[in-house]
Image (cartoon, rainbow, N blue to C red):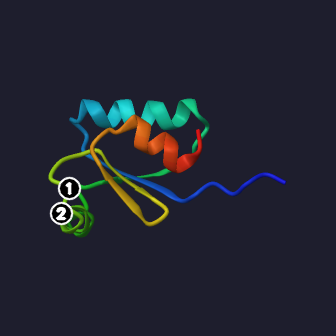
Amino acid sequence: MEKKQKKVVLFTTPSCKWCTTAKSHLKSHGIKFKIIDISKDHKAAKDCEQHGCRGVPVYLIGSQWICGFDQKKVEKLLNI
């Protein structure tokens, strides 16, 4: 039986080059994820700030917040 993937949300802004890298990285591993543009969603931007994140990309994997593009941490959490 296939193990269920943790829920992944990626908080981004349109002009962020690291956000593009983060999206490509997730896609290359077949990870499904939801994108939230924090330049349009101010509540989401506040949520990121409350978890200590001052820039994008921000990952929410299950209940774990990751500030910035941290490939090793993301791969460890998603077992990829």
Q: What's the residue at 24%, 65% (across, down)?
A: 51
For the residue pair 5 and 12, the one nearer the viewer reads as 5
Residue 33 on image: x %, y %: 51, 50
Q: Give the distance between the C-alpha atoms of the residues marked 2 and 1, in whole angstroms.
A: 5 Å
Residue 75 on image: x %, y %: 50, 40
- Residue 18 is tagged as none
The residue that label 1 is drawn on is: 53
Q: How many labels does the image show?
A: 2
- Residue 49 is tagged as 2
Can residue 46 be seen in the rendering of this structure?
yes
Residue 43 on image: x %, y %: 24, 70
For the residue pair 78 and 35, the one nearer the viewer reads as 78
Can residue 32 be seen in the rendering of this structure?
no
**What amino acid does circle 2 point to?**
Glu
Helix, strand or loop at label 1? It is loop
- Which image quarter holds the N terminus? bottom right
* In contact (CB < 8 Å): disc 2 and disc 1: yes
Looking at the rendering, which quadrant does residue 6 occupy?
bottom right
Helix, strand or loop at label 2? It is helix
Classify residue 74 as left or right of residue 38. Answer: right
Q: What's the residue at 78%, 51% (across, down)?
A: 2
